[in-house]
Structures are given as structure tokens and as C-alpha cells.
Amino acid sequence: MMSSSQNATAALAYAPIHVMADSLRAGTWSASQLVDCYLQRIGCHDEKLHAFAEIYEKEARIAGELADRAIRAGQRLGPLHGIPIAFKDLLDIEGRPTRGGSLFWRERVSPVTATVVQRLSAAGMITLGKTHMVEFAFGAWGTNATMGTPWNPWDPQTPRAPGGSSSGSGVAVAAGLAPAAIGSDTGGSVRIPAALCGIVGLKTTVGRVSNHGALMLSATLDTLGPMTRDVEDAALLFAAMHGPDRNDPQTLAHPPVDALADLKSGVAGLRLAVLSEAELGEIDPEVARAFVLALEVMRGLGARVETLSLPLSYRRLADLTGKIIAAEGYALHREWIDRDDAPFDVHVRDRIRWGKTLSAADYIGLMTERERLQREVAWALRDLDALLLPTTPLPAVALAEIDQGKSPMSLLTRPVNLLGLCALALPCGFTAGGLPISLQIVGSGYEEARILRIGWAFENATDWHNRRPPVP
Amino acid sequence: MMSSSQNATAALAYAPIHVMADSLRAGTWSASQLVDCYLQRIGCHDEKLHAFAEIYEKEARIAGELADRAIRAGQRLGPLHGIPIAFKDLLDIEGRPTRGGSLFWRERVSPVTATVVQRLSAAGMITLGKTHMVEFAFGAWGTNATMGTPWNPWDPQTPRAPGGSSSGSGVAVAAGLAPAAIGSDTGGSVRIPAALCGIVGLKTTVGRVSNHGALMLSATLDTLGPMTRDVEDAALLFAAMHGPDRNDPQTLAHPPVDALADLKSGVAGLRLAVLSEAELGEIDPEVARAFVLALEVMRGLGARVETLSLPLSYRRLADLTGKIIAAEGYALHREWIDRDDAPFDVHVRDRIRWGKTLSAADYIGLMTERERLQREVAWALRDLDALLLPTTPLPAVALAEIDQGKSPMSLLTRPVNLLGLCALALPCGFTAGGLPISLQIVGSGYEEARILRIGWAFENATDWHNRRPPVP
């Protein structure tokens, strides 16, 4: 049994950011209390959960005190001021290590501070630490053979896949060790851990959020996005993170948007689409059932749910995506990935080495096919507000049962990256065994505000996001 | 000796478009006369010059009559109405052959009409025919072992390189067989034949002119541009050709510009740069001398000519460009280029096959390096109006002396493609042996109007563009 003080701490730890922000403003909580709360919980539980690669205890406490002083002086910067956050260990913070989940980079020191870290810090957020991840961000299960695999908090007994590659970010937020974390998503790496850990994850469109200062895997597909307790928090972080940055030319064509203005406007009259069942491939029956119920919720809220027939094979799209990631990952890592004496996770190493087998012509063919598909799908989605899919075809699988050679987990997320879209993953149910199930709301490129609005309406009508995992 | 009627025909044939347009408007010449004049000259001289792959005599005559009828009825469409033009044989005209310089495609029928053909036809231009080219547009000398090499009209005795790949377009305009032609430029294919044939050639920026309906060599680098008698004509054609086209997504981000408004505003006070001599590589002494004199002309017109030190090797840039073209060319042609029974020009075949040796990682590395170089050079050019270079390091070389394995001709043009810039080639002198020398005015991306303005000022102060070749 928990003590009442532990219960109070847990209540604080699981509060969404927008609630914390109200309490900070009202003075009922302080930033130092928040920092203390999370550092205490990390101290108690992270040995088992293994979400954090690095904890900045001293700096976080000082930042908490400074934030409180600013609040007392009336200098509150906005809704993120004084709120703790964790960063995936592929985001640079100048002078500190960034290892990208790899023992090979254990001595690497960040040469710059990533733009997202700068922006969230400028908005007053307090960095708790860096979270574990799949080596080089290439893996959907969330395992890491050399740095350790975070523990999915929804099963206290059996170690289960946390989802990857932003595994530690997912576990930290799900287990109340941080109210939010930033992940990266190249083929599902924000959405899959969000799905398997029962939290919210936003995969942004390429060019929407600066990648400056993030270790890359695929220049074509890499994106950064928030992982949070609820949709409003994702919108708050997205609002602070996104927008043009001189250090990332891809962002320059995409002026900022107001992601909060219409957040709570509901979905009445919006046109949502689902794909005909056959095209979804093999979906776990409990996931399929939760998905159908989610559609009912959307209909109940006044949305129009239509069936869209897209002549695309998910398996083909996921395969194309995997090839692009492997080719670009190999191009980035070729100088060391071929070394047999380096301490790589062999599963990741083999995925990247496979990129070596592709020729320039193969790669150009893949990119040409991608452009064609992007145009076709952009056209098919032109009059729709979003496409609904499950996020993963399965709930969290036991580590003992996973096949490292092939992960089904990214089957429904990779196409979103390939096609230049954005997507929001959010809880939409639980299995009989208590594992989270996730709904994926897919939008056209740069329609983050719209999918957040749809997600908020769904969340506001359901209670799935309020459930807490049994661990810790 | 020419007869006086031949002389009159030649005067007509060598008139620039803007002069013809005035005469058409005034009624002193008719479109039918223009069509007759060029068809007659083609009939007389193209057996030797071999500029045309196909001549649309009947259609051109009908179009001439229709144009005259419209003019008589007061329906003149603009300055291009009733003016003949030739198209490089890689531009589709629906239902007609487009062979891309290849015997392999001799049966190919165009499925669409290229956007530039549509636009120039809509402006009233009359298609005389299609011009010869280097097979698959991959070669700077201008030779074609299977379809025949056009004759450079500046030397009646010795067959010399016309420059490629838009060889027939260069020869047709230089020899007064057409007042203008459209070429494509992937590494210099508009500018090199313009230089070696003593005419004006505009290499546009990628995305400025729609590539829809053009046979591709390199999706990254291919551009279309006008080849004309003078700069004003190039500006007139550019004005009619460029601008967004739904069928080429690359154009959609680049709204039209007014290329004529400031054309005659001069260069007083403009900042032009030259690179320090060492970086230009091996330049023929007569070319170097003409270049220095061209700088004097610019200074005399009030331009500021500065020395810019760019830490770039032209050879390295040209090499990167060649690799990208080979990789993308191989990706496009892989289905047939490996067949030993197909009737390819072996030099072109070998250049393209070489692209097969590049891996996906090599190609991705090239593209990454290109992006870095583009950013560096864009920064170096930010306060400059243009960079001046020779177009080719040598004048037209005798065919007997050329090395098919390596062409120096694209050394100073390829970097412009690689770096995402635009450039204008125009006559700036002649060798003692009477071969044309060309000045290259290089602008930042999408600054076509500015380089046309600079070119117009130079041309207006010199007389090189008025000289006619001895053949025919």
C-alpha cells in the first residue's frame, strides 16, 4: 500500500501540464515542488523502469528555484514556465553527453544545444534529464541490448516492449517520472512508445519542428514531437517547439500556426475516414474492437466517419520506409557501423548494415516512388479532416516473444512518415490484461492543429488517458 | 557569292525576335514569310549542319497563315506571336516522336505536350521542328555517334564540337535556321552549345520553368531554358515559359516574375564578382583575355567588379555534379542501358552505366554535400548581384581532337547546376581563328531577371552578338 504522502506525490506527478500551470500561477504548487516530486520518483523507481540515461538533479533544482523566483516577481513566461521535461538522448545540450542510445558514443559531447531544447527552455521548462532510446533510433520494439531496455510500466511482472525508439520518453511520461518528454519519429518512434505506454504522442510533419541539434537517422523522414499525458499538453508543447529556424532549412517554408485557438472546437461536421478493413492487415482483435468503439465515439461527437479506399498496401509502404531509413542510416553511420569491434546492439547494427546493399539507383527509385505516393495520397485526403487508424496492430508484447528481425509495430506508423503526413497517437482503450490500446489520428502534412483538435474532442469524451499504470 | 535574294533572306533569318515582332506588327513582314524563310534555309543548309531531327513543314506553314490571319484581324497575342521556334528533341509534343537523341527511342511517341511547348504555342510561336541532341542529354561535346553530330557553323572546313547536349538547338539558332530554340541544361547543356555556337543561352533555376513533358536525365538538376540570338529575346522567351505549373510540383513555390521591367536598367552600381584566377583552373589564353576585356566593359558601364574568394574547387564541384547525373541517369535508364544489344552511343552508355557503381550511401553523401555547398555559396553571394565566369574554358575543339572520356567543357557550368543557381551565357569575343568566346553571368537562385539585365547591358555595349558565322 502507498502512504498518503506517496499518494499526494503521485497525484502531483500525474497531473497534466495545463493543470500544473494553473497551480503554479495560483501559487498552490511551486516549480521546486514539481522538480522535487519528479526527482524523488525517478530516484525511487527508475532503477526498475530504466527510463533515464542521465539525470540533471542539481541543475533542475536550481532551475526550479529560479522559476519560482520569477513567478513570485510576476515574470511568468507562459504555461510551460516551471514545468519539468525530459529529452530523448539524441537531443544535444551543449557540453553534455548525447549518446543516441549507443555505447559507441558514450564519450560524445554535444557541440550545440538543439533548437527544441532552446525553445522549451526559453519557455521556462526545466530539464530533468535525458531518456533512454533504441540505439541510433532505429527500432520499434524499444529494446537496447547494450544500454538496457526501459520497463513498460503497464505490466509489473513480465517485461514487455515499451515501444521504440523513444522508449525511455514513453516510459518516463507513462510512469509519472516526467510530465512530458520529447521524442523523435522516423517511422513511428514517438507514436509506438506512446501507444504501448498509454500516453499521447504527436508525430509532426517534416519541416514543422527544427531538427537542429538532433542526431539524425534519416534526413528525409526524421521528425521531433512531444510525448505527454494528454492532448492539451501535446498542443502546448507543439506550440512552443514548432516554427521556422535558420539552422534547419526545411523549416523555413512553414510559418508558425496557432495550435491552441481551435483546440476545443470539437469535431461536429468534420470528415474523418477509415480504410476498409482488408487494408489494415493483421490487427489484434482487442485492438480492432477498441478501434471500432473509437469510431463510435467520433460519430457520437458529430463527426462524419467515411470509408476510404486507398489502393495501397501497408506492408509495401512500411517496406519502402524501412529501405529509405536503412539507406540513409547507413550513409550517416557508415564510418563506424561496419566495425565488428564496436559495441553495437547487433539487431540495430544489422538493420543499418542492410542499407549498404542498396544502390544509388535503388534509392533514387524509392524516393521517386515516395513522391508519387505522396501526391496520390495528398489528393485522396484533400477533402478529409483526418484518417483514423490504430497506432499499433498489437498491444505491448512480452520481450521474450519478440522477433528482432521483423517488427509489426511500425506497420501502421511508417506510412505516415513516408507520405509526409502528421499523426497523433492517443489512448483509446485497454486489453483485458490491462495493456493500453492507441488510436492514431492522421492528418495531411502541416495539419497538426487539426489532428490535435480531433484528439482533444475524443479525449474529452473518454477517460482512457486518466488511467495510471500499476508500476510504480 | 550569295545572291541578293539570299542576302535578304539571311538578314531576315538573323533578325532578333524583338525586331521581327516589330515588323510583324507593322506589317512589313508576315509570319508566313518568316516560316518560309526558315524552312528554305533549313532545306538548303541542314544537310550539312544536321541541326534538325524532324521538321514540321506543313504544320508550320499552316500555323504561319493562321498567325497572319489573326494579326490582320487585330488578334495579335504578344511579342512572340507568329515567331518560329525549334524544340530540343526531348520535349514532348503529343502524338509526335520524342527520341531524346536516341535510336533506342526511335519509335517513341510523346504521350503529352510539354508545358513549355504549350506555353510558347499559346503565346503564338510556330514550331519549326525538333533539334538533334546528345543521346539522353548526357554529354558536353555535343556529339552523337548514332544520330549524327550537328556541324558547328563557325568553321566551314573542320568539323568542330557544337557543344552539348543541346547541340542542334545551338547550331540552328547560330546558323539562322531558327530565331530561337529551347534547350535543357543539367550540367551546362544550354550554355555550352550557346558558348561554342556564339549565341545567348539562359540556364534557369530548378523549379522556375516546368519540366513537365521533358524527358529527364536528373530530377535534381534538369532545367529548361531559351537559346536565342540576343538577351532581349532570351528574356521574352523566359517571360513566356516560366512560372508555376500544376504538373511540375517543383515550380509551385516560385511565382512568376517580371523579367522585362528592369531589363534595360543598366548595371551602374551593381556588385559583380570574379573569382581569383587560380580557382578558374586551366583557361585557354584567348578565352581568359576576352574575359578580362568583358570585365573592363562591365566596369565601364559603372558596375563594381570585386574579387571573391570562394574556397571551392571547380573540379570537385564538376565531379560531384557528374556523379549525381550518372546516378540519377542510371536510375532512369536502368531498364535498358545495361542491354548490350541496344543501339546506344557507347560514350553516353558508359557515362550512364558508371552510375551503377554508386551505392545508396554514396548518393546520399553527395546530396548532403551538395546541400552544404549550396548554403555556403548562397551566403557568399548574398550581397552580390552576379558572379562572372567564362562559360567554357575552351572555344570549339575539333571533333578529331576531343576526348570522350572526359570533357573540360562543363567545368565552369556544372557548378551552377549543383549549387542551385541560374546563369546566362552570351558572346564576349572571338578567337583569332574566328571561334566564339562566351561570358557566363551567374546569379543566385531565381535571379534570372537580374542576370538578364546585366547581360543586356553588356550586349548593348558590345557588338559580338551581331557577328554571323561563315556557314551557311
Image: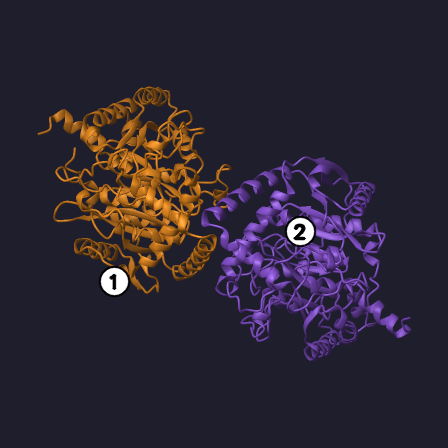
Chain colours: A purple, B orange
Amino acid type indicated by mark 1: Glu
Left or right of B443? Residue A171 is right
Subunit of mark 2? A
- Image quadrant where residue A177 sits: bottom right
Q: Quadrant of the N terminus of chain A?
A: bottom right
Crowd tier of the residue under label 2, counting other residues whose Cα lies within 10 Å: few below 14, some 14–19, many 20 or above: many
Secondary structure state at the residue bearing disc 1: helix
User: Residue shown at 52%/58% (left/top)?
Assistant: A330
Residue A285 visible from this viewpoint: yes
Instruction: Indicate which label's residue lies in the foreground, 2 or 1.
Output: 2
Q: Which mark is residue A81?
A: none
Secondary structure of residue under mark 2:
helix
Q: Position of residue A325 (x, y in %)?
A: 56, 54
Image position, residue A141 (x, y; %): 68, 57
Q: Nearer the viewer, residue B457 or B171?
A: B171
Q: Is residue A127 above or below residue A288?
A: below
Residue B177 position within the rendered picture, expressed as x and y whole percent measured from the top left? 24, 31
Q: Position of residue A168 (x, y in %)?
A: 70, 65
Q: Residue at x 73, y 41 (%)?
A: A272
Assign the C terminus of chain A to one quadrant of the image: bottom right
Task: Report if residue B233 is visible in the image.
Answer: no
**In the image, is residue A345 above or below residue A418?**
below
Res B277 label: 1
> Please, what is the three-letter code of the amino acid marked with disc 2?
Ser
Numbered mark located on residue A410 in the image: 2
Of all residues, the one furthest to the left in this rendering is B1
Q: Nearer the viewer, residue A117 or A216?
A: A216
